[in-house]
Image (cartoon, helix red, strand yellow):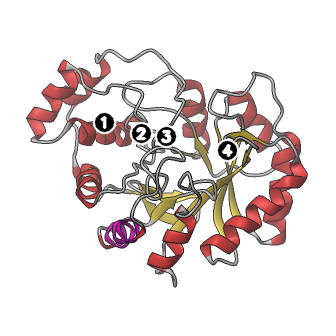
Amino acid sequence: MSDDFRLGGDLLINRMGFGAMRLPTNSFHGPARDPEAGRAVLRRAVELGVDHIDTAAFYTSGDGTVRANTLIREALHPYPGGLVIATKVGPVFTADGGLAATSDPGALRALVEENVTGLGLDRLDLVYLRIGGLAPPPRGESVAARFTALAALREEGLIRHLGLSHVDAAHLAEARAIAPVAAVQNHFHAARRDDTEVLAACERAGIAYVPFFPLGGGVSDLNGERMARVAGRHGATVPQIALAWLLARSPVTLAIPGTGSLAHLEENTAAGSIVLAEEDLADLAAQRTAPVRTPTAPSAS
């Protein structure tokens, strides 16, 4: 496994974690996957040393019959000591079955309590405030009222640590003036490296930087001559090198690749043991990156 990170200053976790979005369905709100397969993936992830699982109450199959939080509870509760479960709140279902981010601070308590109940917990380890929908939120949008509402729930004891998702550096600074921020979850991977300002701010403050879609999310092509060359030198796959690059990119980056496949889980987890040499990093630094596109039906990888 990869080396460790102390999340929020007190939760020691492996930097290679697991994202739960693909457990109920392969694509956002697509057909339900076999729930027993999802439970098997979760149990195997823990056996492999994964101690950081990223989830959300809105990670569900299109028909609502399979939910990531339910699978996590059924597979792993009572939870092993040291397992950190992170979730995110903000997005709510619309009348047409889509997702939109709420701007109502008062709505966040119910969303937090939904995660508490669904996961069978008394307190959530880490809760991200996710702002915006699939597209980035408008620049200048304030997070103060919503983050203050979550900070109050932290004071009540429902939340241990707070995070932010889909934010820029101004959002991060605004939130940090209200309460400590333990983690930021933004769109970043080997083919999309434009979030350097937020990553640098996280590095300076010792805040975890947790890229969502670490393997491209189904909308970015990670393949390239240089990526393939590095993979060949290590006898690894391109996705494994993409994950190893994320961990090498900064000491504060965590990886949360998601999958509903045991084989892919094994492959992804093994990437935490790949150590990239200076030659590898030089090749990957010169790898051409893809144009930024907003996913319309995101996957969890």
**Which amino acid type corresponds to the residue marked 1 in the rendered image?**
Ala
Q: Residue at x 52, y 85 (%)?
A: 78
- Element marked by disc 3: loop
State the count of labels: 4
Frontmost residue, 79 versus 282:
79
- Quadrant location of residue 161? bottom right
Q: Which residues are magenta?
A: 36-46
Q: Is residue 175 left or right of residue 181?
A: right
State the CA–CA distance, disc 2 to disc 1: 8 Å
Q: Which residue is mark 3?
A: 211
40 vs 290: above or below: below
Q: Residue furthest bottom?
A: 78
User: Considering only order in the chain, which callout, 1 or 3, is on the residue closer to the N terminus?
Assistant: 3
Q: Which residue is mark 2?
A: 214
**Which amino acid type corresponds to the residue marked 4 in the rendered image?**
Gly
Q: Position of residue 27 (x, y in %)?
A: 46, 44
* Contact check, label 4 and label 2, Cβ < 8 Å: no
Residue 8 in view, yes or no: no
Frontmost residue, 26 versus 229:
26
Q: Is residue 108 left or right of residue 51?
A: right
* Contact check, label 3 and label 4, Cβ < 8 Å: no
51 vs 297: above or below: below
- Quadrant location of residue 151? bottom right
State the CA–CA distance, disc 3 to disc 2: 6 Å
Q: Is residue 39 magenta?
A: yes
Q: Position of residue 11 (x, y in %)?
A: 54, 66
Q: Which residue is mark 1?
A: 242
Q: Position of residue 148 (x, y in %)?
A: 86, 50
